[in-house]
Amino acid sequence: MKAYVFPGQGAQFIGMGKDLYDSNDECKALFEKANEILGFRITDIMFEGTDEELKQTKVTQPAIFLHSVILAKALGDDFKPEMVAGHSLGELSALVANNVLSFEDGLTLVSKRAMAMQKACEAEPSTMAAILGLEDKVVEDVCESVDGVVVAANYNCPGQLVISGAVPAIDEACEKATEAGAKRALKLPVGGAFHSPLMEPAREELAAAIEATTFNTPSCPVYQNVTASAITDPAEIKKNLVAQLTAPVRWTQTMNQMIADGCSSVTEVGPGRVLQGLFKKVDRAFPTASASIGE
């Protein structure tokens, strides 16, 4: 079974999507529609802006979403997923590509999500850190041993778990993880503690917007971050999407479940090759590819 996967924050680069804008009238029209919906010309930043401009959460998240979703649409009849998944923000891209959300509703939710997360980041100094070379259980135990808010946030692949929380708690957890034998405990250049209890104000804000949005039955199962399992019920998809902001991204578990359910190849739709690399960490021989027009 062929799966399509959609990347999350961190995959952005200047120039992303310009080839689609320049070569395809339908893609150009969608980018221009996005500029209208967002109320600013995000295409100018995506195509010719600075890294600093592109790194703003209110820009990064819609930019990655647009690149992924418009690329999926450009694939046309070549886009025939039998299962989809997205990493964090990428789950919204997957839901649009999978006909659960309209392009307009998906982009509106992404924009509201980015703004709400930005606001939550500004409320308390917080961050994330990648812990490399430890088993998940050891990292979880380290987090539990620390006073203050620090939790396992992104189960990216075996031996790579990102933790999230208040700055002092992250610092202490990094020290303890290093003492426990981690190869590296590396603080990440992010705006705040995504996928942690500190995102609760953002979760509440986004919940209202998600509840007011129409979710359709997907054209194929979507493997959601919160459950790491195949979901087809629109009400359940909604509930999991709301929970996602404060719950961990179970990507390791998602990859294992997709493979167990018969996934035989993965195509990454959007900027970068991060998710392909994570699948290779599970199985070096696993077939992966980047989506391209005329694929």
Image (cartoon, rainbow, N blue to C red):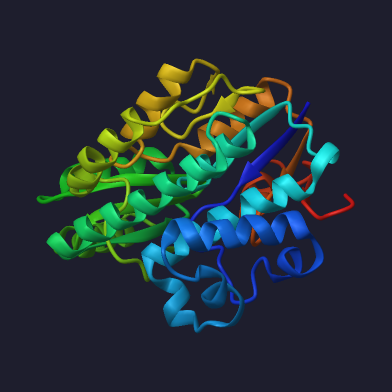
Identity of the residue drawn at 46% across and 35% down: 225
Along the line of sight, the residue nearer the viewer: 58 or 42: 42
Residue 281 in view of the camera = yes
Quadrant of residue 86 within the rendered picture = top right
Locate residue 153, reporting x and y percent: 35, 46
Task: Indicate left or right for 32 with 105 as reference.
Answer: right
User: Toward the viewer: 20 or 88?
Assistant: 20
Where residue 210 appears, as percent x and y from the top left, is 35, 33
Q: Is residue 252 left or right of residue 72?
A: left
What is the quadrant of the N terminus in the image? Answer: top right
Q: Nearer the viewer, residue 163 or 131?
A: 163
Q: Say above or below: 233 vs 67.
A: above
Q: Position of residue 236 (x, y in %)?
A: 42, 19
Count of picture labels: 0
Query: Residue extending furthest right?
Result: 294
Which residue is pictured at 53% across the width and 82% down the height?
49
Q: Position of residue 161 (x, y in %)?
A: 42, 49
